[in-house]
Image: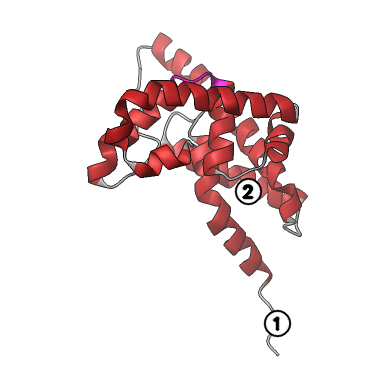
Amino acid sequence: MTPRDPTADWQACFRELAPKLLLYARQWAACGADAEDVVQMAFVRWWQRNPGGDREHVPLLYSAVRSIALDVRKSAERRLRRETNSDVALPGEDAPHFDPPLEDRENALMLERALRDLQPEQREVVTLRIWAGLTFAEIAATTGETTNTVASRYRYALNNLHRVLAPHREDLGAAPAAALA
């Protein structure tokens, strides 16, 4: 019997969770590269504190992404202020959060604009619920809010998205409409 590779479980966990964490990190990161760095730093931090890889602690991983992303954003803002004051300004990257096929790009941009117009707290809950697949209890643990507050924010966000996207429902097709139903 060959010994089991201890890193295999972590690699599988990373492959499963990283895309969801990356989307979550993009809410705060200035660019895709920063979001990728944030996810990697959060995973390392999670692994150091949770070497067994217990899935019960996944909300802590989302909390780590949130905390690190906010720290990275603050650091980038400070750096940008310093560079602006020294006449060395760098253009920011405004890449879309989604990477859809070419034919779906317009729909994705419409949905992204609608998400961006939500209050940050509502957008965070929608991202964690729909794209990360977390329960309201896990989202509450991640954000430090009550389950009822999280559920209310989710309900308000969906109502706002339905209102904004209703005129475009036929253009969006079944997939986004089903995700927001």
The residue beneath circle 1 is 3
| Left or right: residue 89 compared with residue 146 | left
Would you say residue 144 is visible in this rendering?
A: no
Q: Position of residue 86 (x, y in %)?
A: 40, 12
Which residue shows up at 29% across the image and 34% down it? 170
Judging depth in this view, the residue of 171 and 52 nearest the camera is 171
Query: Does the stretch in magenta take in 36?
Result: no
In the rendered image, the vertical position of residue 83 relative to residue 130, given as above or below: above
Q: Position of residue 173 (x, y in %)?
A: 32, 40
Q: How many labels does the image show?
A: 2
Q: Distance between the residues labelled 2 and 1?
A: 25 Å
In the rendered image, the vertical position of residue 15 relative to residue 89, given as above or below: below
User: Where is residue 55, by image quadrant?
Assistant: bottom right
Prevalent SS, magenta region: loop
Q: Where is residue 107 in the image (x, y as percent from the top left)?
A: 30, 35
Label 1 Cα neighbours within 10 Å, binned few <14 / some 14-19 / many ≥20: few
Label 2 Cα neighbours within 10 Å, binned few <14 / some 14-19 / many ≥20: many
Which residue shows up at 49% across the image and 30% down it? 29
Would you say residue 154 is visible in this rendering?
A: yes
Determine the secondary structure under disc 1: loop
Judging depth in this view, the residue of 31 and 104 nearest the camera is 104
For residue 81, which numbered disc appears in the image? none
User: Where is residue 59, by image quadrant?
Assistant: top right
Question: Which region is colored magenta?
Answer: 116-120
The residue beneath circle 2 is 43
- The three-letter amino acid code for the residue at tag 1 is Pro
Which residue shows up at 44% across the image and 19% down it? 117
Determine the secondary structure under disc 2: helix
